[in-house]
């Protein structure tokens, strides 16, 4: 929200500046905290797109999930291997389906056998 209001008052340059500041401090603010929590549960976090060697210049649809795209292409799923990456819940359209069947409060039990 802070970025939204900043952009309304000061324009896109202010928004870009705020995004840059967020990226520069992400490791000390968010990743440090997240790493401690994840480590406390015996796991290790991986952030490949935050690696300084990540090639972020690739066009959309080429850089994301490269290994999965190669496997899909080798299985002759050429169209699927070239589609832009989308989050699972949006790519599968399940989010839209679920939103049509929202449960309000305790009106019903979504886990009942009925």
Image: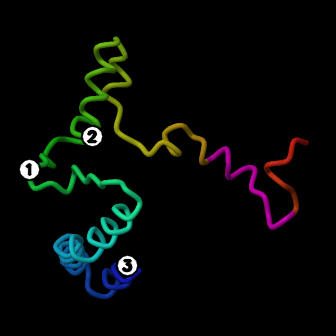
Task: Tell me if residue 96 comes above or below residue 61 in the rendering.
Answer: below
Reading the image, the residue beneath label 3 is 4
Mark 3 vs 1, N-terminal side: 3
Magenta region, residue range = 96-106
Q: Residue at x 34, y 11 (%)?
A: 76
- In the rendered image, residue 80, in percent from the top left (x then y), is placed at 38, 24
- In the rendered image, residue 75, in percent from the top left (x then y), is placed at 34, 12
Reading the image, the residue beneath label 2 is 64
Alpha-carbon span between mark 3 and mark 1: 30 Å
Q: Are marks 3 and 1 in contact (CB under 8 Å)?
A: no
Q: Nearer the viewer, mark 3 or mark 2?
A: 2
Q: Nearer the viewer, residue 16 or 64?
A: 64
Q: Residue at x 88, y 62 (%)?
A: 107
Q: Are marks 3 and 2 in contact (CB under 8 Å)?
A: no
Quadrant for the C terminus, please: top right
Q: Residues within 10 Å of mark 3 (few under 14, many from 20)?
A: few
Q: Main secondary structure of the magenta part?
A: loop
Q: Residues within 10 Å of mark 2 (few under 14, many from 20)?
A: some
Picture quadrant where residue 31 is located:
bottom left
Reading the image, the residue beneath label 1 is 53
Residue 62 part of the magenta segment? no
Residue 103 part of the magenta segment? yes
Left or right of 108? Residue 60 is left
Q: Residue at x 36, y 21 (%)?
A: 79
């Amino acid at each position: 929200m802070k970025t939204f209001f900043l952009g309304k008052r000061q324009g896109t340059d202010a928004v870009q500046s705020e995004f840059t500041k967020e990226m520069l401090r992400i490791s000390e603010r968010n990743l440090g905290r997240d790493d401690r929590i994840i480590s406390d549960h015996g796991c290790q976090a991986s952030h490949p797109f935050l690696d300084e060697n990540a090639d972020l210049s690739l066009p959309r649809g080429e850089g994301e999930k490269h290994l999965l795209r190669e496997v899909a292409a080798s299985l002759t799923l050429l169209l699927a291997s070239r589609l832009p990456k989308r989050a699972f819940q949006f790519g599968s359209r399940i989010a839209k389906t679920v939103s049509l069947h929202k449960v309000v409060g305790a009106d019903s039990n979504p886990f009942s056998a009925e």
